Image: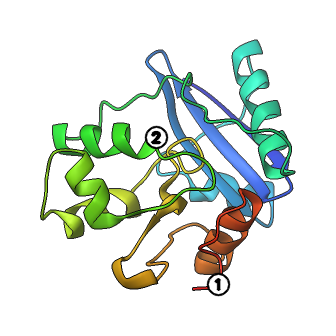
Amino acid sequence: MQSCVFSTELGWSAAIWTDAGLSELKFGYPSPAAALAGLTEPANPTAPSPPATRLIERLQRFAQGRGNDDFLDIELDTSQLTPFGRDVTTCCREIAQGETLTYGGLAATAGYPGAARAVGSVMRRNRWPLIVPCHRVVAAGGNLGGFSAPNGLDMKRRLLRLEGSERVTM
């Protein structure tokens, strides 16, 4: 297992990698200690490997609003997810920058029509925000829904604005 802490325009971030891929990413914290404390597993930061360094640089560019990065090439360690959670996560990763999809729409896309609330639960526990762009998933009726990252809906609006989405005023 490898972990590191790094700064972006969106605040301090922490990440954990296993042999299977990126295990967790947290962002938007006011300090390195707060970012580490936001991880679900305790971690002792190390110097990032070359692949981790490349991802950190990509995340920093994304946070600056530079580039259109979908992060689809990033391998995730999804071992802690149920099959439903994996399906929802996979489909969420396909939502393009600047686009949004409702919780119900994501449920239907993942093959589970009517499971909007369950999709909301998967998004609330998303271990890879930005890589799995849960900020692009919104409530029906034009509401933004929720967002569990630091600064909640303000951060969700900021991310949507950064990506050029029209959904930032709700």
Determine which residue is flagged by label 1: 169
Quarter of the figure with the N terminus: top right
Circle 1 residues within 10 Å: few <14, some 14–19, many ≥20:
few
* Residue positioned 38% across, 76% down in the render: 139
Q: In this view, does 59 lie to the left or right of 15?
A: right
Q: x%, y% of residue 71?
A: 60, 32
Give the quarter of the image for residue 79. top left
**Which mark is drawn over residue 69?**
none
* Front tag of 2 and 1: 1
Dot 1 amino acid type: Thr
Instruction: Name which of mark 2 and mark 1 comes first in the sequence.
Output: 2
Q: x%, y% of residue 124?
A: 39, 64
Dot 2 amino acid type: Arg
* 18 and 81: which is toward the camera: 81
Q: x%, y% of residue 78?
A: 35, 32
* Residue positioned 36% across, 37% down in the render: 90
Q: In this view, does 37 lie to the left or right of 92?
A: right
Secondary element type, mark 1: loop
Secondary element type, mark 2: helix
* 141 and 45: which is toward the camera: 141
**Which mark is drawn over residue 93?**
2
Q: Are marks 2 and 1 in contact (CB under 8 Å)?
A: no
Q: x%, y% of residue 165?
A: 65, 64
Q: In this view, does 99 lie to the left or right of 110?
A: right
How many numbered marks appear? 2
Circle 2 residues within 10 Å: few <14, some 14–19, many ≥20:
some
Quarter of the figure with the C terminus: bottom right
